[in-house]
Amino acid sequence: MRRLIFLLIALSAILYASACAEATVAPTPTLAPAPTQARATTANPASTPTAERAQTAMPNATATRTTTPTTTPTHTITPTPTVTPTPLQTFGVNQCAEIWQPGVYKLTNDIVAPGTRDCIIIQSHDVTLDCDNRTIEGNTKIVKDKQYVYAAITVRKFNFPLLESPANVEIKNCKARYHKFGVNVTSGRNVYIHDNVFSDNLNTIDHTGFGIFLGLTDGGGIRLDDVRGARIENNTTESEAIGIDVRNSDSVVIRNNTASKNSAWGINLLNTSNSEVSANTTRENVRYCRWGSGTVGRGCDAAGIILQDGSSNVVVKDNQVLGDNANGIFIKAHGMRCGDNNVIQNNKIIGALYNAVELSFCKGNKIIGNEMAGSYDAVYFGFTNGTEVRDNTIREMRNHGIITWNSRGSVIANNEITNSRVGIYMYWDEWEPKQFAFLPPSPDKYATRDNLIDGNFIHGNAVTGIRLSGAIFNKITNNRFANNAKNITTDGKTDGNTIQGQ
C-alpha cells in the first residue's frame, strides 16, 4: 500500500514538472522573429496573422523613416545648375592654344601669333577667356602689305559630326592687333564680349585711304556670324575695315563701344534682326574710292552705323555719331533685302559728309527724336512705304533738312528744321530701270503720294520751307514758318494735295 501511494506521488510530480515545462515553452511565439518575417513577407499577404503583426511593426519603422525626410532638403541640390558656371577650373595660357573644355582661361603673358593659323581657338561650352589686359599680336614679319589672314581669337563649332555651337562664351580684357579679326565668332549662343581693345587689324584700303566703293568688305575688330543672343559692350575697335561686324545673327546687343576711324563701317549689321545698337560712339568712318563717274572722292557708302541685307526690328538709339562719317546711320537695301520696322531714336549725328540718316526701298522705319547737324542732307529716303520722321531737331544742313522721293504713306511731323537750303523736299522722279531692276512693278510708277507733313517748325531756310514737286494727294497741315525765303512752293503735278499756310 505504501508502495502504491509512493508511486502515485512520484507520478503526480512528473506530471506537474512536465506541465511547468510546457508553460515556459508556450510564450516562445513572442520570441519568434515574426516581425522580421512579417517585413520580409509584406509583399505576400497570404497569412493574415503575420500581416497583422507586420502592420503593428510598420508604424514604428515608418515613424523613424518619416523623420528621414530631413534628407529631402537634399533639394538644396536643385541649385546645382548654378554650380555649373561657378566651379569652372582656371587654366593659365602662355601661348596660342585650342580650348576644348569648360573653364576660365587667363593669359599669363603677351603672345605673338605664328601668323599661320588662328591663335586662340575656343571649341567648347562654358568658356571664359580673360586676357588680363595682355596683347595677342599678329606676326607682321611674314605678312605682306598688312593683308592679315588669321584671327587672334576664334570661336567655332565643335563635336564633329554633330557640330554644336559653343554656348556661354565670355571674352574680356583682351587686346589684339595685326590680325584679320580681333575676335571671330563663326557660331555661338549666349556670347559676351566686353572690355577689349581690338584695333589696327585688317583694313581694306591702301596707305592713302583709297579702296573699293563698298558692296561688302571684310576684316576688323569684332566679327560675329550665326550667333543667337550676344552682348558686345565697352570695346574699342579702331583703324581697321569694320569696327564691329555682326552677320546672320539675332538678338544681339551692341552697347557702349567706340568704333571709330574705320574705312568701311563703325558698326555693321547684315541680315541681323531683333537687336539693339545703343550708346556707342562712332566717328570718322570713311574712305576714298572711284565713283561711277570716275571721280575719286570720299564717301563710298561708308557709314558710322549701317543696317543692311534684311536687318529688321533693330533699335538704334542714344549713339554719338560724330565727325567725318560718310553717312551717319544708313539702312541699305540697294539690290539687297529690305530692312523693315527699324527705329532710329535719340541719336546725336553731327558732321556726316552726306546724309545723317539714309534709308530707301523699305517700309515701316522710324526716325524719332534725333539731333542732326552739319551734313549735306539730314534725312534722305526714297521708294519707301510708311516711313515716320518725327520730333527731330535738324539744323545747318548744306542742302535739305528732309528729302524724300517716290515714297508713300510717310509721316513727317513735329520736327524743327532750321538754317538749311530747303526744309522739306518731297518729289517724284523717273528712275533708271536697270539701276533699280530689283524693284517690283508699281502701277503708278512709285508715285509720291498719300504723305502727311504736319506740325513742323520750319525756320531760317535759305530757299524754301517746304517744296513739293510732282507729289500728289498729300496733306500739309499745322506747320509753323518763320524767316524762310518762301514758306511753301509747288511745281509739276500736284493733284489732290491739301495745303495749309502757303
Image (cartoon, rainbow, N blue to C red):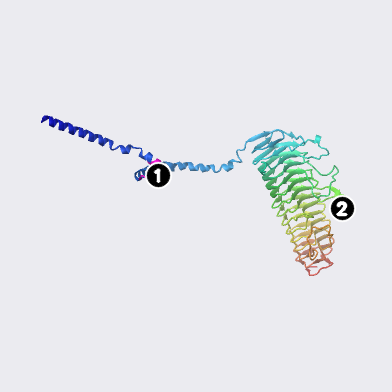
**Location of residue 453 in the rendering, given as x and y in whole percent from the top left corner:** 76, 64
Which image quadrant is residue 53 in? top left
Asked whether 39 falls inside the magenta stretch, the response is: yes
Q: Quadrant of the N terminus?
A: top left
Type of residue at label 1?
Asn
Q: Residue furthest right?
A: 294
The residue identified by callout 1 is: 44
Range of residues picked out in magenta = 38-47
Q: Quadrant of the C terminus?
A: bottom right
Q: Are marks 1 and 2 in contact (CB under 8 Å)?
A: no
The residues tagged by marks 1 and 2 sit, at their Cα atoms, a distance apart of 95 Å
Of callouts 1 and 2, the N-terminal one: 1
Tell me which residue sits at (66%, 38%) in the image.
100
Work out whether residue 29 or residue 264 is closer to the camera in this orientation and state it.
29
Work out whether residue 316 or residue 391 is closer to the camera in this orientation and state it.
316
The residue identified by callout 2 is: 292
Asked whether 252 falls inside the magenta stretch, the response is: no
